[in-house]
Image (cartoon, rainbow, N blue to C red):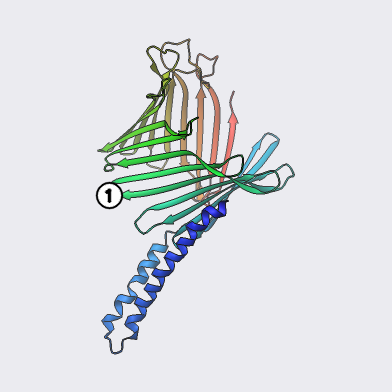
Amino acid sequence: MIAAVARPLWAQAQSSEQKPSEEKATSQKAPEGKAGEPKPAEEPAAEPKPAEEKAAEPAPEPKSSKTFAVRNGTFSYSRTEETERKKTRDGEVETQRLRMPAFGGDRRVMMEREIRTKKLADGTVEKEYVLKNPDGSDRLVPTEIICEKIKKVGESTTVERETLKPDYSGRWTPIRKERETSAGPDAARTSVKESRERSITGDWRLVDRQTTTEKSAGGKKELRTVRQLPDTYGRMADYEVRQERVSTATGKETREVTLRRRDFQDTINPKFYLVERSVSEQATAAGGKTTLKSTKESDLVGGGAARDLSSFKARVVEEKVQETAPGKGGSTQTVEKVKERGAADNVLRPSYQVVQETDRSGHVRQVFVTLQ
């Protein structure tokens, strides 16, 4: 069934790409066939070559692999993330694989994701995400397909997304449709994302709406996202509000994120409680050392999703200090210390520490130490 979905996409790509290549060949041969043509006439034919070589330089690597080794006491395992890219006549095919040790001890593919990209003549980009999982018989079978279409017109961008899954008979059926539109310049941009799902009667109904407003000026950036969900009467009502402010100065960056959600315990006059308010400051010293300090406040119990009824105001539930310093030979070392407040704690206590070392080749060694 997957092949039936993908064949029309790449069959059209091959036929559409063959014609321009033939026209290009004839246009280059035409000046050569004319006799007695002066030398300046030959120079325009050689000009596109440097441009083509320059455009091909930033192309990503066709194959890449990352291995993560995890050891917890006497137990250890590793996982490998592989990426393979292949160019097509009108786009690209990217295959992502996750390998982990299975029950038999072999490192088989536990998940595979294939991303097919096609660029149309009018600038529209079509993408197809095919997710494959093992079926229990050492075979990878597709379990989900996401079709996406991106179209840009001036400062406006429209993204249409459709999610398909097989039903009980194996037929691919759309279960979710999304439409995201964004308009305006980068300094003042507004985007609206709407998601629809089938109801019991079979019609498509709006189940989620997110409106994001982005403003930036003078080294300051502000984002505000309002998420709406259907209420008891089926009307769209505000459920979550997220605000983010970022200010940048010389050698220092401050970020503040506030997340509030509707309190459904009060049905007559719904209020919003504070899920998270985090303030982080990042400073860079002259020697290249970077220090990141962050503080998180919440109305919830530390490490849980229940309301903290013992306090009438938000309390600090986490403090984090992260220091990154350059090492020898192009390596870097990052030390992160975290303090948390548990469900039964009245004060912050040291929770854990993470030490990460990265060499110049990109190899990472990470050590997680529990302090409690």
Q: Quadrant of residue 293?
A: top left
Residue found at the very far front of the displayed protein: 201
Instruction: Please say whether residue 253 is visible from this viewpoint.
Output: yes
Residue plotted at (39% across, 32% down): 209
Q: Residue 311 vs residue 368: left or right?
A: left
The residue shown at (41%, 22%) is 231
**Residue found 37% across the figure and 77% down from its top:** 26
Residue 361 image position (x, y, % from top left) = 53, 52
Q: Is residue 57 above or below residue 142?
A: below
Q: Tell me residue 317's x, y (percent).
A: 47, 21
Characterize the local packing of mark 1: few (<14), some (14-19) or many (20 or more) Cα atoms within 10 angstroms.
Answer: few
Q: Is residue 215 left or right of residue 134?
A: left
Q: In the visual, does 318 lie left or right of 166?
A: left
Q: What is the residue that sits farthest to the right in this orientation?
A: 104
Q: Is residue 260 above or below residue 216?
A: above
Secondary structure under tag 1 reads loop
Q: Where in the figure is residue 9, as x and y percent of width and height?
A: 48, 57
Q: Quadrant of the C terminus?
A: top right
Residue occupying the far left of the picture: 218
Q: Nearer the viewer, residue 37 or 364?
A: 37
Looking at the image, the residue that sits furthest to the bottom is 36
Q: Is residue 61 visible in the rendered structure shown here?
A: no
| Mark 1: amino acid | Gly
Is residue 242 positioned above or below 105 on the image? above
Judge by depth and name the residue closer to the eye, 65 or 254: 65
The residue lying at 39 percent from left, 15 percent from top is 270
Q: Which residue is disc 1 drawn over? A: 154
